[in-house]
Amino acid sequence: MTQANNFAFGEDEKMLRDTARKFLQDNLPTDKLHQLVASDPDPYRESLCLWDQDLWRQIVELGWTTVIVPEADGGMGMSLVALCALMEETGRVALPSPFMATANASLVLRECQTSSASHLLGAIAAGRTATLANTPQNGSWRSGDCDVELVDGVLRGAAYFAQDARKVETLIVQANTAEGSALYAVPVGSAGLDIVADAIIDLTRDQAHIHFNNVPVGAAQLLCTEASRVLERAEPAILTLLAADMCGAGEWQLQTTVEYMKVREQFGHPLGYFQALKHPLVNLMIMIDQAKSLVYNAASAIDSEPENAAKFARMAKASASEMAAFASSRSIQFHGGIGFTWECFVHLYSKRQKHNQVMYGDAKYQRRKLADLLMGPIAA
Amino acid sequence: MTQANNFAFGEDEKMLRDTARKFLQDNLPTDKLHQLVASDPDPYRESLCLWDQDLWRQIVELGWTTVIVPEADGGMGMSLVALCALMEETGRVALPSPFMATANASLVLRECQTSSASHLLGAIAAGRTATLANTPQNGSWRSGDCDVELVDGVLRGAAYFAQDARKVETLIVQANTAEGSALYAVPVGSAGLDIVADAIIDLTRDQAHIHFNNVPVGAAQLLCTEASRVLERAEPAILTLLAADMCGAGEWQLQTTVEYMKVREQFGHPLGYFQALKHPLVNLMIMIDQAKSLVYNAASAIDSEPENAAKFARMAKASASEMAAFASSRSIQFHGGIGFTWECFVHLYSKRQKHNQVMYGDAKYQRRKLADLLMGPIAA
Amino acid sequence: MSPQAKKDTSEQAEFRRYCRNWLSQHDAGSPTVRLPQSAIEIMHGEQLDYLRKWQGEAYAAGLIGCDYPVAEGGGGRKNCQLVANQEMARAGKPFLPNILGLGMAAPTLHFHAQSALKERLLPGLFSCEDIWCQGFSEPGAGSDLANVQTFAERRGDKWVINGHKVWTSLAHFADWMILLLRTDKSSKYDGLSYFVVPIKAALGEGVTVRPLIKITGETGFNEVFFDNLEISDDYRLDEVGKGWQVAQTTLLHERGAGPMVTPSSGRGSGSGKTRAVGDAYGLIDLAKHSSRDGQSAADDPLLRDEIMKMIIRQEGSKQGARRAKVEGLCEHPMRIPLQAKLVMSEIRQDSAAVAIDILGAHSSLSIGDDNAPAGGEWPLAYMNSYGITIAAGASEIQRNILGERVLGMAKSK
Amino acid sequence: MSPQAKKDTSEQAEFRRYCRNWLSQHDAGSPTVRLPQSAIEIMHGEQLDYLRKWQGEAYAAGLIGCDYPVAEGGGGRKNCQLVANQEMARAGKPFLPNILGLGMAAPTLHFHAQSALKERLLPGLFSCEDIWCQGFSEPGAGSDLANVQTFAERRGDKWVINGHKVWTSLAHFADWMILLLRTDKSSKYDGLSYFVVPIKAALGEGVTVRPLIKITGETGFNEVFFDNLEISDDYRLDEVGKGWQVAQTTLLHERGAGPMVTPSSGRGSGSGKTRAVGDAYGLIDLAKHSSRDGQSAADDPLLRDEIMKMIIRQEGSKQGARRAKVEGLCEHPMRIPLQAKLVMSEIRQDSAAVAIDILGAHSSLSIGDDNAPAGGEWPLAYMNSYGITIAAGASEIQRNILGERVLGMAKSK
């Protein structure tokens, strides 16, 4: 297939995105977000799961969760580029929601090509939420690794670093089987399932590890039998969506800091006068632009140049991760004393970006995998 | 042994250094250096070997080549710290000379502990010059590797990247032997020796590769039979001296650029007013100070804490190499258009520093070896 | 014999023996509460009480204020604070809580206060009976410190203070405060004067302290409001209008470049085991015990390289402190001292960032999570590091100072 | 069909077929002399002659100036220069030598010259009959370009020029020069006017060209002295006092952000094989063929990481050019265009620095050494990269422009 014109970002995608931007800015301005997730600053508080479920119901009504669900399964069947544009907006407002988790689940289900997966995709189009539960305790970022196994019709073991697990209804669980590995749909509330909240730094997400104490699973819950291959095929899109979220958040960090540079004065000049602040912010802008261009390139490649998908997605995530680290650091530093306080909003984004940076593999990991693609593996 | 007070830099060392500084600044101001080595800019010119042999004779008379030669062998038997201080000064004026090559040869000879090596050290104290010829064509930085072998009493093969080979009288040649590897003293002009000049970028040095076409060597030329071990023991001091040279050159790059920042005006201000220029130069100053502190720490450790010598020397060279790259880059950039011209002196130092950066292992290499020391090797 | 001991003067050698002996026999005991990463993050009275008791004991034993005159409550020794610091660190004792008093207020009092005042105040400062804080920054005077607007109006031999200070660490516990105030609105630098103020005594009567919360969720610094607080002229340091010069003494010591050595201790919990969080060498241990992408982080060539970069910078900085004492090896006397705060604060920040890379997926876990590697202290240290790169002259200001005072380039503002 | 071809308009599609056909049948032949890395490093007439002949043939075939009006010597096409550029690059043809004319003088003439002047001058510029150079910078006007002092004094319908321009690439070959001159000393920006001047005709009669040598030892740029050079008012562009505005058109195109697409070609030697020097992807090949520390550089995890960093930046920049055309995906219309020069110049510099790391000990060898890997071109490219980060608005100035014009922060000067 060939490269899409304008990243396949056309009128429909633009309208979807512009509507989303306005909706989110109207409904979740940053002060409201801060009230929602940062009311209790105690670092030893019980792990919280704070999100606006009314807002989420409106989002479901707006159809965002159906964007990449195929039309045959009751979705809108739009492109990944369209979903990326939405994800950039949810990142821009640092939305606490199961949106990304459910999108990731949909991307995996799309690759399963089984009737059970189609059925669950249909449920997602109708509003059901889901997340992936497929990471082992050692934090491996490789699709093949998991600590859950299927023995005698029950799941045993544990999955770690499950995103927004306390906001969703269904878990997509990877399990080692006698034949290899498989994916199962496990509803939250199933017998033997123990979802343990992690206390995490990011205030806009929740994360959990999940114990499977002999959770029985039936044939109808089997989504596919080649979990590693399916997860690997979905990985470029998952990385790209995450990078899109990071670009949106990065743009917020840039614009918020730039605005402060215009109003805050020291030594008789607005801070933006000083090159020690101006030039790093220009560097940040360039990093955001690079990451964003790579995100839309990857998204459009996933839709229309599958042979380039993995390569471009790793570039996007690596670029976004480096950008996010820099954005988070400079937005705090350049706000000075106020930037170090809980009441200043920048910490919400810095924490979300730190979380984003390492999720599904940090920049170093992505570049290592990219080098394997472009240069071949290291000679033994 | 224990850490020396004040890096063992006392009155004697200070006087030696201060005298050297004045001597070099009087006799080799930068304009004179430029006339000496940069008269022909043609990049395709025949490879040149330009240095001031009169100046060198004076240096020998001042005794610099005897500083670390043991008293028993006719030298001054001073500390490596003293030699470092001298090397910093020769780096500051980017001296083209066999000083470093001969010092490195002396450091290796010191470790041989044979009468032939003592004899050659005595000759060096009396003014003889020498360089190491021990690097293979593949550019390996490890002491064990060489492309020369001893067969039936003659040397065959080649040595590469020999420093200032056209300025010296004796080569210290590493050769693989039936028993392992050995070092031989081979006078320039020996039968079968072919010294081929490299065309190099650094205008203040010369470099050559040397073919050994059945060069006969006698027993009196054998300096030691455990070349790898001897070279490894001398390596910390060789690295430290080079780093000292780089610190001196770095200080010249900093001060010269800072002076330009004071006189050159744009937009109604001296350039140093602008933080985009001021702050990177402060960063350079910090890098120089770090490298220099690590150099004197390493030198004093080599003299009095041998268990820390390798570790501290690698730190010094790694730090100096990063500093040199930054100094070279910023001194050109901040001089603007004039910095890009042959007639501006900064290029002489940038080229010398690029050469220094990779000699005996660049920063990445040094950190890799340091990690092996501090963390143990990577598990297979 | 330790490396340092070799170089001791006879007074230092004897004092070192004394310290070592005392420290071997005295322990702070196990804390009953989790201790913060440094004094400026003390949140609870319980944390303070534990640490305060330890400082009091150490002072009583003569390990604090060693180089100050006996009349000022000091030990009257010469170059012995360094020895006490080395021995306290070696013994891994808890840190000293009255850090702003010891590091900033004490040297400023010593150099600028009248005898009666410093003889009255320094003993309580050393013993930790009185906690001290520093009132410099204001909402409109951060990096531009000389823009201080909090005003002291003279009324006879009294001053009446009105205004608003911010980022005041330890103010919620403090008995005394050093204060930079405006006494003349017509001149920026020469309109400043310097005072010490008994703020705890004035709480509710002219002084209000409002805690601020840090990005970590910890408290520890505050806003302080002055509403017609009346103080005696006896509390003024140096002349009226000389506040900026006095403040330079404070700042020089704050940045680790002043002549008086600040008493400091190990960062340990009292058990003798120094916590490695924030120290670049500690990254090695973290890597060896961390699984990143399912493998030992210590075997990742890129992380090894990052760790070595940090260790080299930290060692360079440490050796720099050593070189700063060798005049013949320094190009400019203030070149290394004025770098100290900038360099160490950025090394700590960058080291903590490397730790986050090492931790991989596990870096998401906070100190509140039982499964967080190394108790979640490294990501916490990363966040807290911004306190240091911002406070006491942000890194950008430090670079201006170095470029201007040391390298002689034109002033940027 | 190539990816680009899919999106062609019908005019573009037809023109692409034409270009491809023509290029397959026409070749520049093997150069008889080593070619430099870019047009601004042309040292010898022999190099120029070879390249000039190629540009002339490409123009005659309609591949240059495609989008300019027919009356100005152009092809009268729409959005076809891009197509010609793509096809010339694809075919790996030599670069075009009249780069300053094509990239800067032509669009400036097009937008600001009177019809008679541009119709007279543009055909010779496109065909390479006339080489052009640019007279902007002066010893006292580098980054602060508006400080130009070279003065044009009006005498009736003539102007008399006196002054001194520097860093004038190609001036030693140039027939024409674009010139920013001061016509009024009382106003900085409004005192500037813009001219074109036939400098070759005036050599020895009011114009002196003195070659400067670069740090690489190559020539290619010059100082140009004006000593009472008299020119006609016909050579003025736009109104007197509007020179700064006209210069913005030149600078915008110089930085790759202007509306007229500059004709450009492959960087090849004519053999169809594009040279990879300066291109980040070329680092992979270099690493695979380089022995560093005695081992394949391609197996070094740290170098692999550095190479990937460069490739990602370069790909990000390339995709940025693609995104800049999608209005809905850009936050500000000039945000990406104004980055182009800064970003590409720093990527080239940093890529060449990575190459030096890859080469290890072999990076010491110059282009004059037969054993230098890849002919020593990478270290040469590193040195030459400073020409780009300094010229046409140094990187520091580009960052000011972006911070001020795009992000709206206060002006720094």
Image (cartoon, coloured by chain):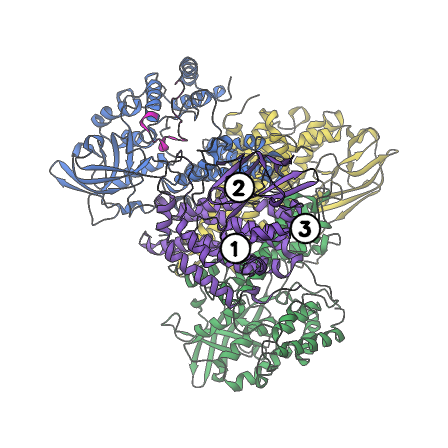
Chain colours: A yellow, B purple, C green, D blue
Residue C330 sits above or below residue A363 on the image: below
Furthest-left residue in this view: D156
Q: Find residue D102 and report its image quarter.
A: top left
Q: In the figure, is residue A221 to the left or right of D276?
A: right
Residue wearing tag 1? B125
Q: What range of the chain is rendered magenta? A: D28-46
Of callouts 2 and 3, the N-terminal one: 2
Give the Cα distance between marks 2 and 1.
21 Å
For the C terminus of chain B, give its image quadrant.
top right
The residue under label 3 is which amino acid type?
Answer: Leu
- Callout 1: chain: B
Q: Are marks 2 and 1 in contact (CB under 8 Å)?
A: no
Q: Is residue A17 visible?
A: no
Observer-nearest residue: C27 or C203?
Answer: C27
The residue under label 1 is which amino acid type?
Answer: Ala
Observer-nearest residue: C153 or C119?
Answer: C119
The residue under label 2 is which amino acid type?
Answer: Ala
Residue wearing tag 3? B373
- Callout 3: chain: B
Of callouts 1 and 3, the N-terminal one: 1
